[in-house]
Image: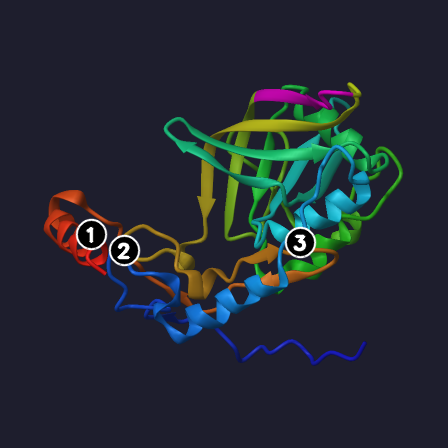
Amino acid sequence: MSIPAFDTTSYSTYTQPPNPSWTYGQKVDATPAGKEWLEGESAGWKVYNTAETDKTDLYKLLISGIVPRPIAFVSTISEDGVENLAPFSWFNTVTNYPPVISFAVNHSAPGRLKDTATNLKNGQGFTVNIISEAFVENANATAIDAPRDFDEWTLSGLTKEKCVQIRASRVKESAFSMECELYKAIDITHPVTGEHNNTLILAHVKYIHVRKDVLTEKGVIDLTKFKPVARLGDISYARVGDAYRIARPSWAQDEAKIQEALTTHASL
């Protein structure tokens, strides 16, 4: 398959939302884009019974349907001092107070992931780093099915940087890195077969390292400078395209509009 080269001139911008004139109670087909979207319903639905679906097919379906996914680029260290580095896209935030994040480790892959899961539980701490466009190939190289106890840092071309509290290194090239301690590890077992193929990691964030050039005056991350990457299905990654802002609804401010809209739609 022939695909074009990566467009280095493209960058994220902020735009209006897809339907800035939307009002409470308005149906999806009220816009041309909405009508076009709903036309797809004519093809019908395919329903998957997860108990009867092959686990490989189920994996492909989930990772291509739950997108885009942020990537946890996790650095760990064994009790013997051997460091590991690996990306995980079953990742997200849990709560800001206490600051807790989560990611899942799949044990069905060989060696490397088992080492990571073991290291995460050894009390040495670990780092979770966010990947930006400039070093996504470097990060992807660490997903290799290397032998046990192999240090993926050696083939990544990335730089180890010391942390404030934990033994594991953070990725210097990452503009956003978190020093973490294990909050809880939850082994996920199949409710029918009892197989244990995954471990859910809840990580307590102790320190956050943010490169100053990606911070705004308001103390938030500037998306256009950060350039984070996301995971899609199969071997696909994605850049963050144009972003748009939609105000969070407020009952105190919008109650009158809501009541008016409901009355109008009820009379149609």
Residue 262 is tagged as: 1
Q: Nearer the viewer, mark 1 or mark 3?
A: 1
Image spot of residue 155 (x, y percent): 79, 52
In 3D space, how far apart are the residues under numbered discs 1 and 3 (Cα atoms)? 37 Å
Tell which circle, 1 or 2, labels the residue nearer the N-terminal end.
Answer: 2
As drawn, 71 above or below 268: above
Crowding at mark 3 (Cα within 10 Å: few <14, some 14-19, many 20+): some
Q: Residue at image x 79%, y 22%? A: 195
Q: Which residue is mark 3?
A: 64
- Main structural element of the magenta stretch: helix, strand or loop? strand
As rendered, which of 225 and 28 lies closer to the eye? 28
Residue 52 falls in which quadrant of the image?
top right
Percent from the top left, x then y, of residue 42?
Answer: 58, 64
Q: Which residue is mark 2?
A: 25
Q: Are marks 1 and 2 in contact (CB under 8 Å)?
A: yes
Query: Which numbered mark, 2 or 3, is in the foreground of this view?
Result: 2
Q: Position of residue 267 (x, y in %)?
A: 19, 57
Q: Residues within 10 Å of mark 1 (few under 14, many from 20)?
A: some
Q: Image point 49% across, 65% down: which residue?
A: 38
Residue 12 visible within the image = no
Could you tell me which secondary element the residue under label 2 belongs to?
loop
Count of residue discs: 3
Q: Does dot 1 land on a helix, a strand or a loop? A: helix
Please state the extent of the stretch shown in magenta in the rendering: 184-192
